[in-house]
Amino acid sequence: MQYFSTFNSSLGNILCLSDGISLTGIYFQNHKPCLVFDKSWIRNQKLKIFDVTKTQFLSFLTAKSKEFEIPLTYVGTKFQRSVWAALSEIPYGQTVSYTEIAEEIGNAHGVRAVASAISRNPISVVIPCHRGISKKGSISGYAGGIERKLRLLKLEKGF
C-alpha cells in the first residue's frame, strides 16, 4: 500500500510517499520527469513518517540541521540504488562529479548511466542528488529545476 502527504516549503509544494513505515519518495511541484499520480495511493497526513519527514525537511531548509534521520526504502534497479547510496555519502556542503560517482561505484565508463540514475532519484534532497555536478564543475539538470538546485547548493555553502 502506498500513502501520500503534502506540505509547503520555501522550495514550493512537496509530495511525500511512504509504504507506511519508511519514506519512498519526495517530489517537488513541477518535478521532471513528472510523477504520475496513482489513484490507489491513500492520503494520510497523520503517518509518523510524514511528520518526521516534514520536520526534518523544513529544518534542513533553514540550515538548522545538515542531515536526515529518516527510514528510507529505495525503489529502483540495483544500479540506481548503488548510485543513490553513493550520493548519500556526499558530505553536506560538498559536490561530487558524475564521473567521480561512476568511479566510486566501479563503473568508470558509465557516467551517462550515473547521470540518468541521479535524474531518477525518488527521494529528492534527502538523497542529495543536488550535490552531483558535471566534471567541469557546471551545474546541470535537476529534477526539481536548476533554480532549486542552486538554492540548495547555496544553502549548504552558507550563502
Image (cartoon, rainbow, N blue to C red):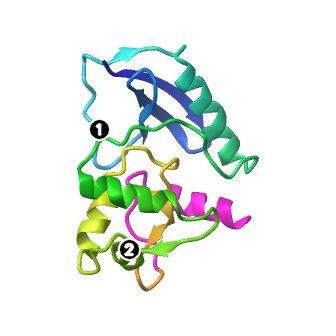
- Taking the spot 38% from the left edge, 74% from the top edge, the residue there is 98
* Vertical arrangement, residue 37 with respect to residue 140, above or below: above
Q: Is residue 123 left or right of residue 68?
A: left
Q: Position of residue 116 (x, y in %)?
A: 27, 62
The answer to whether marks 2 and 1 mark residues whose Cβ atoms lie closer than 8 Å is no
Q: Is residue 126 left or right of residue 134?
A: right
- Viewer-nearest residue: 149 or 114: 114
Q: Which residues are magenta?
A: 138-159
Sequence-first tag of 2 and 1: 1
Neighbours of disc 1 within 10 Å: few (<14), some (14-19), many (20+): few
* Vertical arrangement, residue 65 with respect to residue 41, above or below: below
Quadrant placement of the N terminus: top left
Q: Position of residue 133 (x, y in %)?
A: 44, 73
- Viewer-nearest residue: 130 or 84: 84
The type of residue carrying mark 2 is Tyr
The type of residue carrying mark 1 is Leu
Q: Is residue 77 left or right of residue 21?
A: left
Q: How many marks?
A: 2
Residue 46 among those drawn in magenta: no
Q: Is residue 146 visible?
A: no
Between disc 2 and disc 1, the foreground one is 2
Q: Position of residue 121 (x, y in %)?
A: 36, 51
The residue that mark 2 highlights is 98
- Taking the spot 41% from the left edge, 23% from the top edge, the residue there is 4
Residue 151 among those drawn in magenta: yes
- Taking the spot 48% from the left edge, 51% from the top edge, the residue there is 127
- Taking the spot 66% from the left edge, 32% from the top edge, the residue there is 55
The residue that mark 1 highlights is 35
Q: CA distance from mark 2 to mark 1?
A: 24 Å
